Image (cartoon, rainbow, N blue to C red):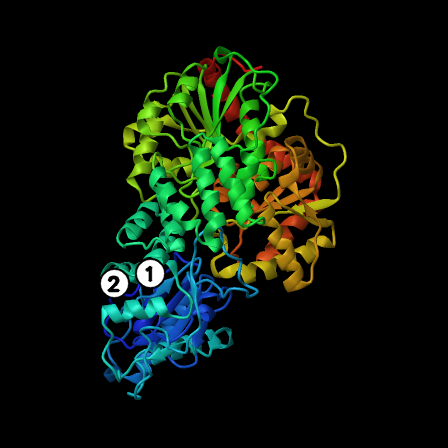
Amino acid sequence: MHALHPRAELRAVARGGAGPYPLLGVLGIDDYDTVVAFCAGTVAAGPLGELLTLRTAPAATAAPGALVLQRAQLTPEFRQRVAAAAAQAQATAGPDAGRTTPAEPPTAGSTPGTPPTAAPEASRTAAEPPAAGSATDPGPDPGPGPERTPPAADAAPGSRPAGKAGGAHPDAPALALLKGVLGDALRELAGGALAHLTEPEAPAPSDAETQAAYLKAPGVTHPDLLVHFGTPLAARTGDVDVARRVAAAHIAAGHYQEAVDTMASVTLPLAAAWPHEVYGHALMSVSRYAEARTHLLAATAAAEHAAPAFARLAHIEWVLGDDASAQQYALAGLDADPTHGPSEEMRQRTVPTPAAQESGAPADQVTHVAFYMPHQGNAGDKLLPESVRLAFGSDTGPRRWHSVHAHRLFDEAALTAANSRRALVVGGGGLFIPDTAPNGNSAWQWNVADDTLRRIEVPVIVYAVGFNAFDGQSYRARRFATALRTLVEKSAFFGLRNHGSIEKVRAMLPPHLHDRVRFQPCPTTVTRQITGGWTDPAVREDTVLLNAAYDRAGLRFGHDYGHFLAEMAAAVRAIGARAEVRCVAHAQADERFVFDLRREHGISLPVVPMYDYDNARITDTYARTRLVIGMRGHAGMIPFGCGTPVVSLISHPKMAYFLADIDRPEWGVSVHHPHLGARLAEQALAVLDDHEAAVADVHDRQQLLWKVTQANAADLRQLVGGPLD
């Protein structure tokens, strides 16, 4: 099975005899929301989206092929009923029907019969993306992703004709048993994408034939399988286009060194612009900047690849501190394509600005390494640096703070400047993420080499940083583990913004460093306490602000975007009967929710373009609304810090981490929840019904985080030489 899919999970199940119900082994699985089991001898003959998008009901194909069960069905009572029905069926059939299935009810991790003949596939977020342009397609993420090839009449690779009938299917008794127990609750599927292999009419294809067939298959190619089949194909044939596709899949997954190795294994013609662009992208992501320049310059020769190549060249020069060269490359990108967003972003980032009118002496300053957003950047990340500074004192300007962008190379000049200051603060935000600003020096957002980090002579303070990897993302490189250990060893204070991040980071450290990792809540969660002169609003607007995020949409929604959109439409209608619902966009991409909601469900919402707001307007807007329903981390933490009730749309673990820290997990609902709309409406209306109590609860929970922040502040004042007022 691993030869066909690298992430297939094979589970051992307890043997209960040689009874006629091997398929019932799936009843022992209880750690997934949805279990999809394929019957013995079943092969995929087409897309499986019909199976993988089911979330609310059990289902089976009309002919033996597949069974889908939901967590709601996999209860002890259901297992008891199945066990009783199995025992009765066996007794009725007589001793010649095979060994009797044990009458003990199956439990989680066990099975009422023999183990399944084919490993069940189970997923919380299904792996196969929806078709492009469909109502359920969340749209492509920025950068390389799954590729599409032109439609073809060929069958999917590995599919087979059904063959000749060979008597009763071995899983037919189990399916009949389950249909008897579930009755009308069991939905019947056509199962046209499945075929039953009985008597193959042709020998199995060779590995080489399977690899070639998959790369030519129509529709969407799954990134895992693209890498799995494409890597040996590229190595054997030297096919540049296959290598490009494999490398792009590696880049999309955050596996940058693997992308470099893939492209290095083939010979690139000078005119192969797209492969040169992908190779340059991979090289710059592991900090091999000089080599990346060569390939990106080659890519600029082709009109369709010039703008992205120039934008990447601009980014390299900006990382290395050469704003003038970065500006020239950005302008070249805009010449190639005046609408190219990344080129315009780099142009704005490198526009010469006058020096700050007031700047303190180095001995009075603290270096602040952070992700500094442009004016139209993510609203949460825009507010964050100022919030961190407020936690140290009332002066957040250049008299007390020396700003260093985390994504720029922390070179010798930056080291010298930092060592002339009082301390160095890193944070806050989700800086521990593999793909926001990939580099080969640290493999996280601060682009600093271990040796440079060790030569910092002032106290290093890591403040309210988060482990921000999505479910499905991972740090595969040893580089990050080593860099993380160096950072913890060097830090005088190492504070992470939630206990989920603490657990993840400690798991990557040796035991003797675990106690160095401590809890420091994000300062945006205590905005009311750290903002001088703060007053709670006497009157709030009768609004509910709703945020949905679209970065890394495949990781957030998986197969469930259509479900999410439909459920959100129901929630908006219900909540809109009580208060005006507005879409609050932390980033321009968040406005996609409004477009999709109007197109698919006929609902129009006004947009609050928070990406265009300054910090004071961000906090004022969140303080004056009655409720915020947010998917982005700071669409929950900022309003909470302003004293506004929140409900979190959980598409990333960090939101669950935050709610766990304030002991309010019920304030969150997963975007995959089968009854998301009803659940969200119920929670929102409960807040609106007793708003005063909801606000009081927020204030109470906020005190927990403020006490931690105050206790840590006492230690930090000693490290930086007093409050920065």
Helix, strand or loop for disc 1: helix
Q: Would you say 649 lies left or right of 581 here?
A: left
- Please tell me whether residue 350 is drawn above or below residue 231 in the rendered image: above
Q: Would you say 107 lies left or right of 554 here? A: left
Quarter of the C terminus within the rendering: top right
Quadrant of image for the N terminus = bottom left
- Residue occupied by mark 2: 237
Q: Is residue 55 visible?
A: yes
Mark 1 closeness class: few <14, some 14–19, many ≥20 residues within 10 Å: many
Looking at the rendered structure, the kind of residue marked 2 is Thr
Q: Is residue 696 above or below residue 150?
A: above
On the question of residue 472 being in view, the answer is: no
Q: Measured from the top left, where is residue 123 in percent x and y?
A: 40, 60
Q: How many marks?
A: 2
Residue 59 at what x, y percent from top left?
Answer: 46, 72
Q: What amino acid type is highlighted by mark number 1?
A: Val
Residue placed under numbered mark 1 in the picture: 242
Q: In which quadrant of the rendered view does residue 501 lie?
A: top left
Of 702 and 517, which appears nearest the observer?
517
- The span from disc 2 to disc 1 (Cα, nearest Å) is 9 Å
Q: Is residue 64 left or right of residue 333?
A: left
Give the residue displayed 41% in from the left and 51% down from the top. 252
Q: Taking 492 as reference, is 586 left or right?
A: right
Mark 2–mark 1 CB contact (< 8 Å): yes
